[in-house]
Image (cartoon, rainbow, N blue to C red):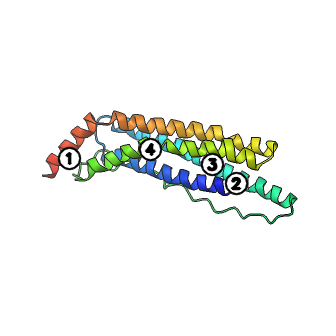
Amino acid sequence: MESVHTCLEDMLVQFDKMNEALDTVANAHKSENSAMIQHDIAKIDEDLREAYKAMKETHSEVYQKGNALLQRAGEAPIAEPETPAPWAARSPGRNSGDDIVYDPQAMAHYEEAHASAQQAGTIVTEINDLFQNKIPVAFDSQASTSIVAHQGEITKNFDEAHQGLLKLLGETAPGEMDELFALDRQLGS
């Protein structure tokens, strides 16, 4: 049961990093494509929220069914740890029509966002291990089947969000972002 809690926490850490990447693009971007980019960002955020919601449901089900098994074995139940709340609701991009304010760290933030998005896929390995190895070993087949059913939704939503983020970051770099930051530097000097 501890494994599912650890995976949930790791997932939230990774999703927070992905949201930082989204914030970088949303708040540093100003172009004719701004509305489309904001739409893509909202869709990615929604996919991440759906994946996290399904993982929280898995978390609760694992503790519920795990405690039922413990009770049948005459063992004390394990209290379900509180699950962290997801990230705050996204607000529209700051620069969606305002003048650009030069941020000397903008390119560094963007590069961090890109690296974060590239690394995001590693959480899939942890999720797969949890659902394909740890849960089936820990529960009888009926309980295991019910819990593992969540994996498809988690993986589908995460994959959509991850691919959307990689595409978004790829489409906004390097050309368009370089031009934006070059203009940014000129305005700032």
What type is the residue that disc 4 sits on?
A: Gln
SS for callout 3: helix
Q: Which badge, 4 or 3, is on the more N-terminal residue?
A: 3
Determine whether label 4 and label 1 are within 8 Å by CB.
no
> Looking at the picture, how far across and down is residue 110, in whole percent?
32, 46
Q: Which residue is mark 3?
A: 55
Rounded to the nearest whole Å, what is the CA distance between mark 4 and mark 3? 20 Å
Would residue 50 be visible to someone looking at this image? no
Mark 4 or mark 3, which is nearer to you? Answer: 4
Viewer-proximal residue, 122 or 85?
122
What type is the residue that disc 2 sits on?
A: Ser
Rounded to the nearest whole Å, what is the CA distance between mark 4 and mark 2? 27 Å
Would residue 100 be visible to someone looking at this image? yes
What type is the residue that disc 3 sits on?
A: Met
Q: Which residue is mark 4?
A: 119
> Looking at the picture, how far across and down is residue 55, in whole percent?
63, 48
